[in-house]
Structures are given as structure tokens and as C-alpha cells.
Image (tube, helix red, strand yellow):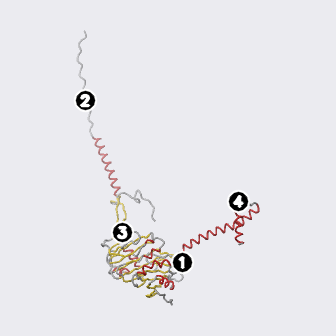
Amino acid sequence: MPSQRGAAVAGRICSRASSGAAVGRNRSQVGAVCRPVKRARILALVLSFLGIQLTWLIAPAYACGCGAMIPDPASRISVANEQSVLRWDGRQEQIVMRLTVAGDARHAAWIMPVPHRATVRLDDPALFDQLARAIQPVHRTRYHFWPDDGDWPFDSHDTVGAAAPPDPAGVGVVDRQQLGPFDVARLTATDPGALGGWLRAHGFPLPARLRTALQPYVDRHWEYVAVRLAPSAAGSSLHGALDPIRLTFAADAPVYPMRLSRLATTPQSLGLYVLATHRMRTRTTIGGPAPSTVFAGRLGPQDGALGPLTARTPYLTALTQQFPDPARISGDHELLQAPADTPVQQVVYDDELRRIAGIPAWGLTVGGGLLVIVAVVAVIVVRRSRRPVLPPPPVEPPPPLSPSAPVG
């Protein structure tokens, strides 16, 4: 109470000082009291602003393109890039994922629903480099006749410059394994609440709103792969490209889980390589614009990490899709065989000025046209200068006058 009265008195003193009631020595005393109050108010505003910013910074990312990413409660993590490969040979599906992450989280959990029991192992990062080279655009030269920007006389010099406690009822643990820095658990669940309890008991925090998102998978008796992500160096944070993880499970039809991405609060993008015997497409758009096919074609024999994946499934379809409003994502991507194996190849045109013997064709044409015009004009002038000038016809004198009769 005394401190409140003091603050009120100080407020009144500041008010009087601003109205000019205090003079002389009293004015200096009032200023001495007023300045700390102003500083306190400014400090309170700054702390409030910082509190809002810190609240935003520690907000966890609950979803990525495939599955759900959950950091420590007091940390933040974001998936800067996600690359996925889906291979389906008619009986078995494989999904290889590589996440590039940023943030200050030292540990994070990644949950991936799968329709059947899955095996999990680490994969070779070179796989994605091989796929990127396989779908590189084809460069073709396109000639233009008239000069464009960058051609003379319009040229310029500018350049363009991701011992355990007992298991609660409702959850069945298939197994748990250590893959490099990753702690991987494969489990089944008949109830999302029990799944969340098991994850928390084993060090995987589960946001409450994620339980509702998991219910459709529980209803369809899917299983889950829960991966505790940790950096390879102790004491460091998760940052950069993580080791790819390969999931292998039985599948009568290829499916790419996307339902959990509806929990994301920022726009999501999907980049998916599909390897099968034929070109593939998605059944629906699941709440986003139609996917774009950036490449479709049959690959030849491959070596390295890509070789085993293309042995019986050589047709590669590369799909991209944007989700500006993730809350509209309505399900998982089911993939179907396209009506035809029509190839798709992006083409990058390199525009060049058409030249003849190193000289721009337009210059030869324009210059030649001017020479022809000059020559025609010269010929006309010369012909006119050589035309003989005929003298005018002679002028005949008038006839003589007839003599007049003599005057009387």
C-alpha cells in the first residue's frame, strides 16, 4: 500500500510538473522524481514487447510436410526444407525422408503414421543429390532476330547477381532401436490418449491438440514411428540437414501421410519423388491447389543409392504442391497410376542473338536494306543525269500581214 500511494503521489507530481505548477528549486526536485517514473514506464513497455517476442520464438512447430515435429517445450524448431522419396512396387512401399531444420532445440520428436508395421533404417544422403541431377531441366538455345536487352545496342554491364518405464494400457511397443543419433520407437495404439502418455513417459512430449489429429489413424488401426531426434555432437542443437530415414512397410496402394500437416500455422509445401513402374498422380488435391508435375520419365540404369530403388521401379514422377492454408488439408495423398506415361521435362531456354559470320543478322539485314535503297536511289539519279536533253522545238515566225487597201 505505501508503494501504491508513493506511485500515485509521484504521478501527481509529474502531472503538476508538466503543467508548470512547480518553479525554482521545487521544479528540479519534481524532475528528479519524474524521471525514474518515466524510465519505469518505458522499461515496462520494453519488457512487455520482449515477452511477446519470446512467446513467439518458443512456439513449437507441430507439423511438417509428412508427420509431426515436436521440440522441447522451451525450445523452437522449424523445418526449413523437406525432401521425400516414395517407392512402390505393387506390394511394398518405401518412404525416404530428409529434413533440414533450424532453431535452438537440442532434442525433438518426429511422429510418422504408417498403415502397416514398418522397418526403419538410416539412408544415404547422396540419394537426393542423384535425384536432383536426374530431373535437371534441359537447356535449349532459342535464337531471336531483333536485339533484346543485353544485346547491342541495348547491352548493359549490370549482372544478376531439416530402463524405460512400463508401457501404459492401449499401446503396444513393436520395438525400439538406436539409429545413429536417433532413438526410434515403433508402436501401435488403440487410443491417442494412451499414445500420448507413452510418448511423454519415454521423453516424447505430445501437444494436446495433436491427439485429435491422430484419431483418424487410430480408427484405421495404423501404426506409428516415433523418432527422438538428437544432434550427433553432445550439447549442440539440431541444425541443418539431418540424416535421411527410410521407412519400409507393406502397402496395397501407395499413400503419403499428410493429415498431420493441417496443424501447421504457416504455409506448407510438398516436394515428392515417386518411383513406380509407371507415371503416378494424386487421387485428390486434399485441400490445396492441384499438384504440379515437374518431371516424369523412365530412368536408365542407376548406380549408388538410387540404383536399388530404380531396379524394378524405373519411372520417376516428381510432384510439387503448395498449401497456403494448411488447416484445409483433408487427408493423406493417395497415389494412382496416370492414364499414360507421358514424359514431362522442364526446359530452360538460353536466348541468343542470331548471327551470320559473327555479325548480328538484324544488322546485316538492316544494313543490306539500307544499301539496296541507296543503290536504287543512286541508279535513278545516274539515269536521270544521263538522259539526253532535247532542244525545244523551233518557233515558227508568224505569217505576214496581208496588205491593206490604200486609204482614199
Residue 355, quarter of the rendered image: bottom left
N-terminal-most mark, 4 or 1:
4
Q: Which residue is mark 3?
A: 346
Horizontal side, residue 114 vs residue 35: left or right: left
Whole-percent x, y for residue 131 in the image:
38, 76
Residue 83, quarter of the rendered image: bottom left
Q: Which residue is mark 1?
A: 75
Whole-percent x, y for residue 296 in the image:
34, 72
Q: Are marks 2 and 3 in contact (CB under 8 Å)?
A: no
Q: Looking at the picture, which amino acid does disc 3 mark?
A: Gln
Q: Which residue is mark 2?
A: 394
Image quadrant in which the N terminus is located = bottom right
Label 2 – label 4 distance at C-alpha: 118 Å
Q: Looking at the picture, which amino acid does disc 2 mark?
A: Pro
N-terminal-most mark, 2 or 3:
3
Nearer-the-camera pick, 97 or 298: 97
N-terminal-most mark, 1 or 3:
1
Whole-percent x, y for residue 169 in the image:
47, 87
Q: Which residue is mark 4?
A: 19
Query: Dot 4 lies on which element?
Result: helix
Label 1 – label 3 distance at C-alpha: 41 Å
